Amino acid sequence: MGKLIEVKEEVVRDKYSLLNIKRFQFGNLLIERPLRALDAKNIRYEHVKTFFSNHPIIFEKSIFVNLGMFRKIVETNDNRKIRDHFDFPYYAKEFPRYISITFTFNPFRVFESREVAENNLESYLMYYQEYSASSLLVPNIKVYRMAEETKRVKEVVVTIDEFIDLVDTMYNILGYCNDKPIFVPFSLRFSMADIDKLADHYIKREYYNIWIDFEGSAITEDKIARVRKFIRKFDERGLFNRLVIIVTNIRREIISNVKKDHTPASDVLATLIGANIVGVNREPMRPIEGKVVIEHDKLLEHKARIFDYNTYYYFKVTKANYLDQETKSKILMSKETNIAINTKLVDDEFNRQAEVLINKDDTKEYISSKKMLQEYKQGSLLKALQYSYHVEKQLTEWF
């Protein structure tokens, strides 16, 4: 069976958010603070050498898998197709790396019997196990999808009971002849009642390695509430320090508006909801119908934004006066360079957050100083992110 990641004893926890510093081994890397993973699909060799030299590195490859793609992998004997689906670029292979997978279908519903579904899952996951080198993430299942006929009405893909059954089934498959840590998924599409049930099941089964799949959504008040609900179940049982949490597929910005020179950052908030490893950015999947057409130059300018740690806004590159023209041009013309630079800038901010926590025992003043958090919805996001751990604990003790 797969093992749990062993967290070293000296956990540092913020008094006013879920930010925490845990030390643990991940592959051949000792992680000593919240860390940003590099996007294996977009960050190139030259970016690794230019921006991440002497820097702790983890690579993530994120894959959304539909039924057709799943069948092709299971049924093919073409090694090249299998490598194209799972493998990492050559320069990533000297670093810790993992693959996150989101199924857009429910295997127990699409195959003719449970036995056939399990056989197909085993075939797919045996390949996956070989390529996700440092840890294994049980695939998440999208809870809803748009109906084929209307593209608007949501269809339920998986119920909470089916989800739990699938997680246990896939966990057991991945645990065969394996000593890598296994993470189990937490979908933010479930109701609070379902989240209660999922957390209770994970605690019962001693699943303490968790990965939270944002599926292209932003970190907003409702998502924060769901994450806090889930983590509190572990905290109430004295298990917070045993949790290791990966948060991934986060939308880069909360709101992306082509007319705005600055837009509110989402990804940088992941550490404040408990993430120990923050994975890749992903934009939401939207139907093509009704898509707004934007001029090419304006679209480039809109997408090419730079994270500003002083404010927690993403600014259009053209408005970043501290960048020289050559750098601006590189970012405008290269999506990959833009992703690499922002990955480094956001990770640098995670390091600052950790330093503030260590030096001042909490981050309340530091986080409260960020202009975006002060301005976004009159500070409602800031209120959602911050709370007093000691007050909550004291109230619990009174009752």
Image (cartoon, rainbow, N blue to C red):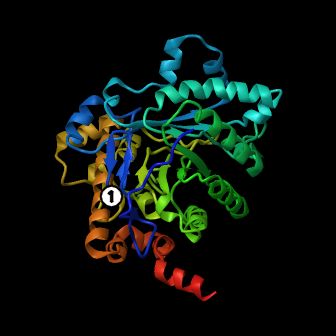
Residue 59 horizontal side relative to residue 135, left or right: left
- Please identify the quarter of the rendering in which residue 64 is found: top right
Q: Is residue 360 left or right of residue 107?
A: left
> Where's residue 376, x and y in %?
45, 69
Q: Using the image, determine if residue 217 lies above or below residue 109.
A: below
Residue 181 image point, x, y percent: 49, 42
**Residue sitting at 50 percent across and 57 percent down?**
243
> Is 228 in front, or is 316?
228
Q: Is residue 349 left or right of residue 124?
A: left
Q: Vertical placement of 112 versus 199: above or below? A: above
Q: Nearer the viewer, residue 265 or 126?
A: 126
State the image coordinates of residue 293 (x, y, percent, origin top left). Answer: 52, 40
Say what secondary structure mark 1 lies in: helix
Q: How many marks?
A: 1
Q: Quadrant of the C terminus?
A: bottom right
User: Which residue is most to the top?
Assistant: 78
The relative height of residue 319 versus residue 337 in the rendered view (above or below) is below
Task: Tell me the amino acid under the disc marked 1.
Answer: Phe
Residue at the extreme bottom of the image, as rendered: 398
Residue found at x 77% / y 25%: 116
- Residue placed at 43% from the left, 39% from the top? 295
Residue 288 appears anywhere in the view? no
- Write down the quadrant of residue 199 in the picture: bottom right
Q: Please report the residue visible at 59 percent of the width from the left and 32 percent of the height from the top.
A: 176
Residue, disc 1? 350
Looking at the rendered image, the quarter that the N terminus falls into is top right
